[in-house]
Image (cartoon, rainbow, N blue to C red):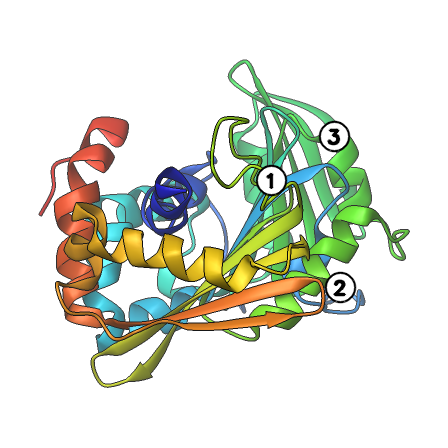
Amino acid sequence: MRAVFGRLVGVLAPALALGLALGGVSGCHRAGEGEGTTPSPRVQRPLTHYTPPRATWVLALQPQVLLGEPAWQGLMDVAFPVAQREAFERLFVVRATEVREAALVRWGEQGFVALLRGDFRGRDVVRALGMRMNTVEVSGDDPARRVGFLGTTRREALELDAASFAYSGDAGPAMAHVAAADPPQSATDTERAELERLLGPAPVRYLHLLPVGPPADSPLYLVLAQQRALGASLRMTGEDLLELQVVLTGTFPATIEENARAVLGALLRSDLGRTLLGRDPAPPVVEVGEQFIRVRVPVQASTLHAGLRAVFVDGLVELFGAPSS
């Protein structure tokens, strides 16, 4: 379970940087620039609602909130440092501060779909992606769509609505689902919707749409044998106070609250727990409901920022080869 907790917290740093660094575009017009085109008539819906079947996980973010509010600055300096922001702007030619809503979806073994909405025109970004492709296989304009190769890598870009676009790699069937005007419901969508309902709104949400699956020799193996999905969120609740929320869905034994408190106690006393949450954290709140368990952990923002930097900056430097600030 320690590894699971580490993955939950750790994903806020490397997954954000990795997700926003996927791509290869330049030459995009800003909203209001370039040729006068009619905005797409497609209905705008939350980006997570485009999640395709077979998605493994979704990282949903509100970049303008995270980058624009001083309370988040320490966390973002670790999770999305200046070098990655500059790389993002070179790749997509939209500033990270222009992005209101973002979702990165892992699909299948290697595929991904990145969805972005903000202060830009989706069709302009898609056209710019097409201009960067050395070979364009498919081109359309209502909505804008480009499918082709960037070097030897096949990519697809699709306008979702007037201010949104999707960009994918190794995920053709997933993009067909994204492009559908009225996609059919799937088990993946049901799990995603339930996690979002339980977590509520937050500028950082992670939705793991598969069971955690602890090893057979783990003491939690039987406890989580019928667990289905997992969600985590991070929201600001005070001047220097965050709330980390973790939700597990599924069917659990009657002892689940006792099990959860025992695991949380061990995590909070561990070296990782003390680094990220401090040596005397506030007690977590555990709630057991029908088909779910929810844990809320109050976190001092400045303590978490310092802990994330200590734990994850070296990993990011190794992954991206970028100097830390």
Q: What's the residue at 24%, 36% (across, down)?
A: 316
- Amino acid type at image mark 3: Gly
- Amino acid type at image mark 2: Ser
In the image, 190: left or right of 78? right
C-alpha distance separating marks 2 and 1 = 50 Å
Q: Position of residue 115 (x, y in %)?
A: 59, 51
Q: What's the residue at 58%, 46% (across, down)?
A: 223
Q: Which quarter of the figure is the N terminus placed in?
A: top left
In the image, 160: left or right of 150? right
In the image, 236: left or right of 211? left
- Residue labelled with disc 2: 40
Residue 58 appears in view: yes
Tell me which corner region of the image, top left, top right, bottom left or bottom right, holds residue 284: bottom left
In the image, which disc is placed on residue 172? 3
C-alpha distance separating marks 1 and 3 = 37 Å
The foreground one among 322 and 202 is: 202
Residue 95 appears in view: no
How crowded is the residue under tag 1: few (<14 C-alpha within 10 Å), some, or many (20+)? some
Q: Position of residue 80 (x, y in %)?
A: 28, 51
| Figure check: 124 above or below 226 | below
User: Which one is earlier in the sequence, the residue at label 1 or at label 3?
Assistant: 3
In the image, which disc is placed on residue 222? 1
Name the secondary structure under disc 1.
Answer: loop
Name the secondary structure under disc 2.
Answer: loop
